Image (spheres, rainbow, N blue to C red):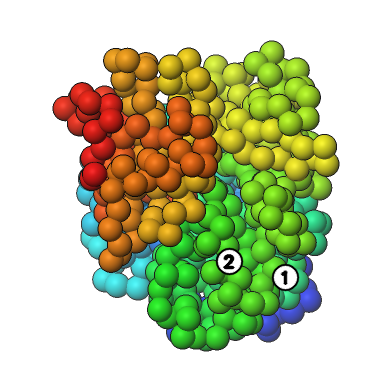
């Protein structure tokens, strides 16, 4: 198993078929294969050797697509960089991973001086944008044009494919080590479920390719003959137009993207009936958003994928047919063909069906470990199982229901409250666009259930109203004791709400806490 396999197969079977479409630029499989072999040759000429780490700091593009092939072709290791990090965070990840060669596009070229200063080991920077080539960087297109193509190293199997840094939603980012077999196993298993990426279809990329969700869809697409339609980043109007204009059959989105799409007028003005498969995941999707998606994409089969970077990334899948059952729509589906999933207690013993415990996963897709973090690797990988840190339960038919991140559980007055349960109730309120629930310090209760709410434009809400709304649907101790209204929530590049950021603002600024527990901000 190796990441370049799909390119070789496509070159043999459909060399003149379109492979990438970026803005008004399209390239065939044969054109892409030649460019990849030349780019790999250029990397070798620049001194890239076996196992060297080569990073990329870029929005999505056809050149990002070529980079993902060319680096393993040159027998090296990919390090896709989270472009939402600060220069200091980026430099730290590059230094920790030992990345010495970095691709940057136009958007991030201004960061080059700071990155060089903070990580002197960054010896070569390649400009992969369309604008003016910054000083001290090498032009991508010149490298491709001038280099001789080299044979594929066929790097694969248990060899390191890449170092992928986690989003840091629950702590400092960790470099996840994934092999070629890890990544391809997840893609093959997801495809074997029968409802992932359409064979010979057209996949629109709006999720960032540095993230395992976007990368996983890219790999699965290569295995089944996909044409890749690439947008630099997610924009709801641009996404709707691209889906319609390029007749995309598939798209992967996270819930925040889905919510923004259905609330953008463009999505209701263009024809999205050609979309056949929508893959989503990363966090809970509200029922109103699901219904709205089904309305604007009437022919799309919905598949939910649950997983994490450490699982390359898929663990469970909720099939399109499962979405017809209102109860199953709230689940994360069942174990994917390549995965084994259990719910265990703190001692690693499987708990009875219906009981909440930690979700653990085993299979050939489980990571090799964390880069240079042996203790954290040993804690996560125990007895052959990846301990996800997610709390969940499993029903009698194997459907997994994710309750919360274990670290996000709130203990108030001795009672356990799962923030995801409270968020699910709040999300049903017609005036709420999105929300997050966290535990904040409380002198009486230890922790208090605190909701941070983004109202829909043009609506009026009070904290008292929302608290009473929740108390008619869940126990009183689970209902938010304080509510804050904001314009937006902090979001990671993967589309996940950064609850750590929300909690930290209360630890750092205790004046935000409320003395009267029944006083509700915004009320």
The answer to whether residue 347 is above or below residue 172 is: above
Q: Position of residue 494 (x, y in %)?
A: 47, 50
Hey, which residue is sitting farthest left in the picture? 511
| Picture mark count | 2
The residue shown at (74%, 31%) is: 354
Residue 514, quarter of picture:
top left
Q: Where, quadrant-wise, is the C terminus in this rendering?
A: top left
Q: Can residue 288 be seen in the rendering of this structure?
A: yes
As rendered, which of 310 and 236 lies closer to the eye? 236
Label placed on residue 198: 1
Q: Is residue 44 left or right of residue 301?
A: left
Q: Position of residue 346 (x, y in %)?
A: 65, 16
Q: Position of residue 179 (x, y in %)?
A: 66, 41
Q: Is residue 447 left or right of residue 523?
A: right
The residue shown at (78%, 30%) is: 353
Q: Is residue 160 left or right of residue 186?
A: left
The secondary structure type at the circle numbered 1 is loop
Residue 479, quarter of picture:
top left
Circle 1 Cα neighbour tier, 10 Å, few/some/many (<14 / 14–19 / ≥20): some
- CA separation in Å, label 2 and label 1: 22 Å
Label placed on residue 343: none
Q: Which residue is mark 2?
A: 291
The secondary structure type at the circle numbered 2 is helix
The answer to whether residue 44 is above or below residue 470 is: below
Q: Is residue 405 left or right of residue 108?
A: right
């Amino acid at each position: 198993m190796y990441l370049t396999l799909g390119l070789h197969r496509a070159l043999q079977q459909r060399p003149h078929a379109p492979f990438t479409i970026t803005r008004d630029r399209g390239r065939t499989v044969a054109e892409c294969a030649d460019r990849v072999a030349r780019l790999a040759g250029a990397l070798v000429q620049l001194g890239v050797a076996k196992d060297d780490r080569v990073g990329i700091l870029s929005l999505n593009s056809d050149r990002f697509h070529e980079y993902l092939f060319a680096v393993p072709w040159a027998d090296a290791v990919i390090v896709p960089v989270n472009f939402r990090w600060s220069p200091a965070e980026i430099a730290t990840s590059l230094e920790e991973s030992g990345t010495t060669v970095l691709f940057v596009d136009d958007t991030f070229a201004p960061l080059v001086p700071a990155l060089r200063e903070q990580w002197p080991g960054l010896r070569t920077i390649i400009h992969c944008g369309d604008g003016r080539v910054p000083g001290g960087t090498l032009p991508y297109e010149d490298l491709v044009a001038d280099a001789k193509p080299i044979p594929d190293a066929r790097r694969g199997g248990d060899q390191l494919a890449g170092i992928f840094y986690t989003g840091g939603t629950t702590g400092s980012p960790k470099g996840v080590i994934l092999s070629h077999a890890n990544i391809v196993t997840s893609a093959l298993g997801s495809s074997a479920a029968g409802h992932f990426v359409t064979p010979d279809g057209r996949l629109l990329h709006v999720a960032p390719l540095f993230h395992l969700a976007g990368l996983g869809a890219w790999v699965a697409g290569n295995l089944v003959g996909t044409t890749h339609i690439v947008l630099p980043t997610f924009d709801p109007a641009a996404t709707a137009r691209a889906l319609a204009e390029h007749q995309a059959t598939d798209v992967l989105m996270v819930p925040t993207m889905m919510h923004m799409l259905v609330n953008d007028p463009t999505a209701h003005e263009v024809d999205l009936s050609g979309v056949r498969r929508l893959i989503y995941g990363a966090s809970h999707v509200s029922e109103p958003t699901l219904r709205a998606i089904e309305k604007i994409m009437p022919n799309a089969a919905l598949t939910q994928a649950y997983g994490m970077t450490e699982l390359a990334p898929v663990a469970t899948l909720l099939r399109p047919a499962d979405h017809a059952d209102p109860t199953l729509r709230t689940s994360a589906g069942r174990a994917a063909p390549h995965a084994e999933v259990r719910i265990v207690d703190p001692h690693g013993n499987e708990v009875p069906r219906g009981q909440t415990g930690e979700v653990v996963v085993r299979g050939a897709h489980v990571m090799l470990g964390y880069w240079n973090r042996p203790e954290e690797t040993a804690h996560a990988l125990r007895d052959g199982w990846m301990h996800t840190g997610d709390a969940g339960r499993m029903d009698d038919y194997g459907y997994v229901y994710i309750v919360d991140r274990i670290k996000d559980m709130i203990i108030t007055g001795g009672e356990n409250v799962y923030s995801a349960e409270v968020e699910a109730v709040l999300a049903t309120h017609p005036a709420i666009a999105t929300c997050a629930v966290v535990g904040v310090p409380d002198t009486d209760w230890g922790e208090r259930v605190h909701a941070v709410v983004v109202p829909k434009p043009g609506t009026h809400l009070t904290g008292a109203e929302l608290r009473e709304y929740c108390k008619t649907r869940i126990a009183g101790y689970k209902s938010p004791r304080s509510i804050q209204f904001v314009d937006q929530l902090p979001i990671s590049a993967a589309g996940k709400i950064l609850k750590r950021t929300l909690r930290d603002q209360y630890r750092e600024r205790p004046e935000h806490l409320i003395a009267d527990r029944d006083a509700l901000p915004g009320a």
